[in-house]
Image (cartoon, helix red, strand yellow):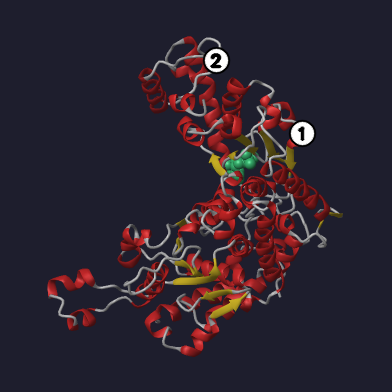
Amino acid sequence: MIHSTNKKGGLVTELPAWQALKEHVNEIEKTHLRDLLHDEARCMGLIKECEGIYGDFTRQRVTQKTLELLFELAEQSNLRGKINAMFNGEHINSTEDRAVLHIATRAHRNQKIFVDGKDVVPDVWEVLDKIKAFSDKVRNGEWLGVTGKPLKNVVAIGIGGSFLGPLFVHTALRTEPVAMRCSRDRSLRFLANVDPIDVARALDGLDPEETLVVVVSKTFTTAETMLNARTVRSWLTSRLGPESVAKHMVAVSTNLKLVKEFGIDPENAFGFWDWVGGRYSVCSAVGLLPLSLQYGFDLMQEFLAGANNIDEHFKNQPYQDNLPVLMGLTSLWNVSFLGHGAKAILPYCQALSKLAPHIQQVDMESNGKGVDINGVRLPFETGEIDFGEPGTNGQHSFYQLIHQGRVVPCEFIGIVRSQQSVYLKGEVVSNHDELMCNFFAQADALAYGKTPEQLRSDNVPDYLIPHRVFTGNRPSMSIMLPSCTAYTVGQLLAIYEHRIAVQGFIWNINSFDQWGVELGKVLASKVRTVMNSARTRDRKILPQDGFNYSTTRMINKYLEGKTQVLYPEGHDSFPIDMLRSGN
Ligand SMILES: O=P(O)(O)OC[C@H]1O[C@H](O)[C@H](O)[C@@H](O)[C@@H]1O
């Protein structure tokens, strides 16, 4: 057995199982999902019920043989060894020389997880205990604002991994009955974009006297977050005085030195560690602090427990009963063998409307790489283009393309018991049943399609038949969760995190670095310098400023369009909406 494509230095494409899967494509090309779905024995083997979750892979273009070949590929790529290396705290993020241990952020208090010989679980729980104590104090009014008012609004400032995960979970819980009770009279808002419009929207209508600001940044250097933090600090201090920062601003970061320099008391800072990647950080203080302020720590512990449940499942279950492994392998099959580079994430649950944006970052930042872990340029494309909207909204938008245009493997996520129940007298089904009818129908519509013969027997006129044919045979998978609660949201999160790791492990890439985001940042910084000099000296950008003709001309067009008001006398300049808010 080949232990590691990494150790051997070879590419995954050179493995015998990869070659076998390539050949197997010809066999699969001869099948149609319409027929595969009639094979009940096959279907039984492709439905997995584990950890309370129903996972249906019957509409993937796979047979038992495909799965066996994929498991063989997993073996030959040393998938198990790589999973273990992650759980054992090895520095698998080699380009940053870091362990990858988001699983430790949701460990039970009595678990032991080691990084460089040190059990990190006590550190994790020290922060969690601090979050509990602080969020309890804010929620029960023991911690008050500088003018003595309770802090019932929270604005979480952060971007990327310091935003999308917490937003996903907050959106998922907003309408969940227990969470609603726990968050009565409280609000949680997010400020991510450096666009001043986002500032205005985040602060609109808020009373600074009742507002707590959480600055969330792993590095505490991210340009957007730091400018937003300075902007909101100025909003607070211009109304409540400089001493308000101590009561109204707290931070989540790995860089406690910079937190202090910013003016936030390190006592009010909640740490995490370099072995938690930004996009994998929602279970650390990044998500737990704002979410505990909104919903209470006890409920958020259930979220952690859900994620932990899937961590154990992922670590311990054999491949054939392992949801993240099966999802990762079938996705890899779709991308690398059937040639489908995109994936649609389609929750039939409005509460999960921010799942796709979150997974976009987790997946595309993790697996959108050009070289393998040894730096060898890959002869194939990794990663997937993720997009999605809740059903049924997506059906009235982009489903046309996925039914008759490009083949886009779909992931349908349904919920058995809705967070909200409505059943109108006289209606055929309840509102949630109506939603779920679409969930069941769409997967079969994609799989079966509609043939010219069927259309003819429906008396469709000849000239319309080509337009109304659905080729079908379009792969999808379906997940059903019993409900959408803090616990199951934690499970769902961990399933997606781990399936992404599975794909990266097999492609033999580093799914835990993100060098591709750097270049744009460097260039923006160069533009910033020139922009400042142009604005302060009231001049155009010149060719010697180092930009090409096209960029120089575009920047000058922009500069001409608006005279900048620089530092008005005595105070900062805020949009009208922000001046209106609060006072
Ligand atoms: O948490 P921060 O250090 O502010 O980083 C915020 C984000 O910055 C960059 O865009 C990274 O690519 C993301 O992975 C990260 O989540």
* Relative side of 321 to 26, left or right: right
Answer above or below: position of 140 versus 116: above
Q: Earlier in the sequence, mark 2 or mark 1?
A: 1
* Front one among 467 and 140: 140
* Front one among 350 and 16: 350
Q: Secondary structure at mark 1?
A: helix
Residue shown at 38%/73% (left/top)?
Answer: 437
Residue shown at 53%/67% (left/top)?
Answer: 332
* Front one among 152 and 482: 152
Q: Give the total of numbered labels.
A: 2
Q: For mark 1, what is the residue?
A: 266
Q: Is mark 1 within 8 Å of ligand 1?
A: no
* Relative side of 550 to 512, left or right: left
Q: Are marks 2 and 1 in contact (CB under 8 Å)?
A: no
Residue 570 coordinates in the image, percent (x, y): 56, 11
Q: Amino acid at mark 1?
A: Pro
Residue 191 coordinates in the image, percent (x, y): 54, 38
Answer above or below: position of 293 versus 151: below
Alpha carbon separation for disc pair 2 and 1: 27 Å
Residue 327 coordinates in the image, percent (x, y): 56, 69
* Relative side of 388 to 512, left or right: left
Residue shown at 66%/68% (left/top)?
Answer: 77
Q: Amino acid at mark 2?
A: His
Q: Which mark is residue 32?
A: none
Q: Is mark 2 within 8 Å of ligand 1?
A: no
* Quadrant where the N terminus is found in the figure: bottom right
Q: Secondary structure at mark 2?
A: loop
Q: For mark 2, what is the residue?
A: 571
Q: Quadrant of ligand 1?
A: top right
Residue 43 coordinates in the image, percent (x, y): 49, 84
Picture quadrant of residue 119: bottom right
